[in-house]
Image: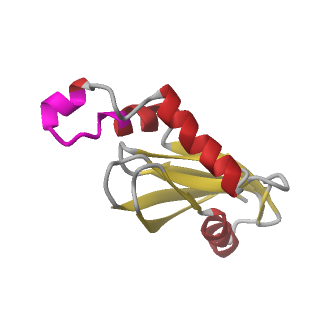
Amino acid sequence: MTVVTKDITFQTEGNCDIIDITPQVAGKVEESGVNNGIITLFVCGSTAGVTTIEYESRLLRDFKDMWDRVIPRSISYEHDKTWGDGNGHSHVRASMLGASLTIPFVDKRLTLGTWQQIVLIDFDNRPRSRKILLQVMGE
């Protein structure tokens, strides 16, 4: 078994910024030299997460609206009392979504569905530089 570790970095706008990172992830699989296996993505940070979704403008709006309904920005968070940075909601949202994702690939191609893209969601309340660690494992 081979393990290849890479990373990719993105500039985000914050406030539930959703970025399609599928091409970059597919490129890292392609250049890894591994034909069949899995790739694990891990967001280095506690106010962003990764998942898959159909990257379609109205669905993206639905996804953002869902976070405002489920974990609103407008309520009090204990974290904000500790640090005063106003991003308590960002930490809770990111922990609910999750910081990692694993995707199988065959013949150096991600096994995503037709309408399925990999996305980075930045929940913080300001622009950030986001690093995603990638580990490609297989043969």
Q: Position of residue 5 (x, y in %)?
A: 51, 62
Name the residue at 68% across, 67% down. Answer: 26
- Closer-to-camera residue (28/43): 43
**Can see residue 38?**
no
Q: Main secondary structure of the magenta part?
A: helix
Q: Position of residue 124 (x, y in %)?
A: 35, 48
Which corner quadrant of the image does residue 29 belong to?
A: bottom right
Indicate the quadrant containing the C terminus: top left, top right, bottom left or bottom right. bottom right
Q: Is residue 63 left or right of residue 110?
A: left
Q: Position of residue 86 (x, y in %)?
A: 24, 40
Q: Is residue 14 left or right of residue 53?
A: left
- Closer-to-camera residue (96/72): 72
Name the residue at 15% across, 29% down. Answer: 81
Indicate the quadrant containing the N terminus: top left, top right, bottom left or bottom right. bottom right
All told, the count of numbered labels is 0
- What range is drawn magenta here? 79-89
Name the residue at 44% across, 35% down. Answer: 93
Magenta stretch holds residue 83:
yes
| Snapshot colouring | secondary structure
Furthest toward the bottom, the residue is 31
Q: Position of residue 134 (x, y in %)?
A: 53, 58
**Can see residue 42?**
yes
User: Is 87 drawn above or below residue 117 in the view shown?
Assistant: above
User: Is 78 drawn above or below residue 51 in the view shown?
Assistant: above
- Closer-to-camera residue (33/126): 126
Which corner quadrant of the image does residue 30 belong to?
A: bottom right
Magenta stretch holds residue 101:
no
